[in-house]
Structure formats: C-alpha cells, structure tokens
C-alpha cells in the first residue's frame, strides 16, 4: 500500500474526522511486527536526505500538527531523527513574541523556510493562525478567514522555489489523549510537559476538530497535501510518516552530484603514494 495515497487529503475534500479511525494500524499486529520496516525506512530516509543535501536542487518542508499529546515531538524523535542535523532542522512555533506579533502572521514563517538542500520540520506551523486563533477568538472571523488563501499563496511561492511540502495531522482519539495526560502525570520525566491549559483545551475538542476540517478542505492542494495519520498507536504513526516522506523523496529522482575532480588521476596518485609508503617500510 502506498501510504501517500492512503492518507492524503484530496484537494477540496470534506473530511469528517469522526469517521477516521485513529487506532488504524493496517495489517500489523503490533510494534514488533513493524519494527524492521520502520528501521528500513529510517535508514533509507538518511540516504535520501544526504542526496537532497548534496544535490541542492530541492528542499523539503514537513509540517506537523496535532492536538495536545498528539505526538509531534515523538514523531521527530523516533522517525525523523534518522536524518543528519547538518541538513535538517526543527523549528517550533509557540505563542508569537512581541516582535513577531508586530508583523504580518507569515513573517516568522518566511524567515525559517528551508533553503535548497535542506529539510525543515515545523513543530506546529503557520496553521496555528487559523486554528488557535480561530478557536480562541484571538482575531475577528473576517481576519482569520482570509488567511487560508494567504497560506496557500505562501506555500505556492515555496513550491515555485523548489520546496516540496508535506503536512501531517497526527490524529488521536479523545480517550487516547486522556490516557496520555494520565501517563504524563505519573511519569516524573514527562511532568514538565503538563500545562494549565491541557485539560482546559479538551473542552474545545469539537471546535478544534471543526477548525482542522476547514483547514483540510481549503489548504490540502495537489502540491502541498495534508495527510491524516492515525496516531493512537505511536509506532504506526512513526511508520506511516516515515514511509510517506521516503515515498516522496524517492519520487524526486535524487542523485549524488558528479565529481568535480579527475577521479582516475587521484586514484593513480593514491596508489602511487601507497606503493611509496610500502617501499619505505
């Protein structure tokens, strides 16, 4: 199964998140059953990212969005960490700073978009300005409702600059979120993630769902698609994201650049140096 096709939101499609099973795990029995394939994807991802970096013809922007506990950090840690940090970076977006808030909402996004040869992962993204802003009424409807077209134009501009865009919504159930909150409360190593807003935001579950469904309908385009990833099972979430990124990069026909030096001459010089060293010894 091509996961890119399986989980892609078609342009203009009206998605109902309640109809998508967040516990879907394909044909796998569990994480052990999928472990070898995930490691293969991670290794392949490392190879492809290196070719992207040295070829410097394309760049890739990966956007991760989810409700609280959806697994953005875990996806980065367990799946996308296979890539070399020299050509890959993570950019997190939180509440805008005073400087960012004084500019257009896309100003802070433009500044950190990927350059050719680079992969950038957005942990949250420019979509916060039609999600959180909408749900919390931080701007009038006539303001945030215009941003969908602005976002599409921004992404089209990136595409015209040879940036490929993959956008992932990590889809969990309300019960799974509650279980993950409980796990954080009981694990001292995760308690730092707890905020006062965590449980308060649960009251807005339906509002966020409606906001995401509008995003999918208006901003999943042929060249900058959204993928809805079943994420109740963390291991399946990791595998699905890794497979889609690998599938996309393999479709770019990436190649290592041809050498800029005379390899035959350097090989002769190398062998001559080895023979000289051997004679001296």
Image: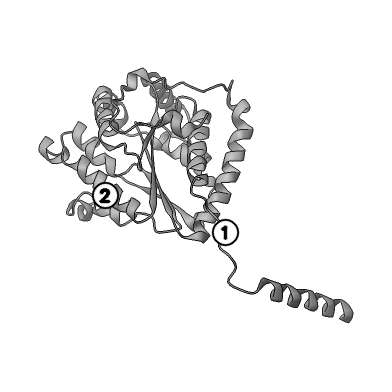
Is residue 77 among what the camera can see?
no
Q: Is residue 123 left or right of residue 236?
A: left
Q: In this view, does 160 lie to the left or right of 250?
A: left
Quarter of the image with the C terminus in it: bottom right
Query: Residue 229, position in %: x, y?
Result: 42, 30
Pick whichever, 267 or 96, lies toward us. 267
- What residue is pinned by disc 1? 256
- Locate residue 176, reporting x and y percent: 42, 22
Image-based side of 42 in relation to 278, left or right: left
Left or right for 145, reference 266: left
In this rendering, the answer to whether 178 lies above or below 3 is above
Residues under numbered marks 1 and 2 in contact, where contact means CB atoms less than 8 Å apart = no
Residue at image coords 58%, 65%: 258
Query: Where does label 2 land, which residue?
Result: 154
Is 269 above or below relative to 256? below
Looking at the rendered structure, the secondary structure element under dot 2 is: helix
Callout 1: helix, strand or loop?
A: loop
Please give the name of the residue rendered at 53% of the width and 49% of the height, measured from the top-left corner. 83
Q: In which quarter of the image is residue 166?
A: top left
- Classed neighbour count for the residue bearing mark 1: other residues with Cα under 10 Å, few (<14), some (14–19), many (≥20): few
């Amino acid at each position: 199964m091509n996961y890119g096709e399986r989980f892609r939101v078609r342009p203009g499609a009206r998605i109902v998140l309640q109809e998508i099973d967040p516990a879907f795990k394909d044909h796998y029995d569990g994480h052990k059953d999928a472990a070898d394939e995930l490691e293969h994807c991670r290794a392949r991802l490392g190879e492809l990212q290196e070719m992207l970096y040295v070829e410097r013809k394309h760049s890739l922007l990966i956007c991760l969005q989810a409700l609280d506990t959806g697994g953005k950090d875990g996806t980065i840690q367990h799946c996308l960490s296979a890539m070399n940090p020299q050509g890959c970076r993570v950019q997190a977006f939180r509440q805008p700073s005073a400087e960012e808030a004084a500019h257009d909402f896309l100003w802070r996004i433009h500044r950190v978009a990927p350059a050719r040869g680079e992969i950038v992962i957005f942990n949250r993204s420019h979509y916060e300005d039609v999600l959180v802003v909408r749900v919390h009424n931080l701007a009038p409807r006539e303001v945030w409702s215009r941003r969908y077209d602005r976002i599409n134009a921004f992404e089209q501009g990136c595409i015209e600059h040879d940036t490929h865009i993959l956008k992932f919504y990590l889809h969990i159930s309300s019960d799974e979120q509650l279980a993950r909150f409980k796990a954080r409360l009981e694990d001292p190593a995760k308690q730092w993630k707890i905020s006062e807003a965590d449980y308060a935001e649960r009251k807005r579950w339906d509002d966020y769902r409606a906001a995401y469904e509008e995003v999918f309908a208006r901003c999943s385009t042929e060249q900058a698609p959204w993928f809805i990833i079943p994420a109740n099972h963390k291991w399946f979430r990791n595998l699905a994201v890794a497979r889609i990124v690998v599938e996309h990069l393999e479709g770019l026909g990436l190649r290592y650049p041809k050498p800029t030096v005379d390899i035959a001459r350097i090989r002769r010089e190398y062998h001559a140096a080895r023979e000289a060293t051997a004679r001296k010894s």
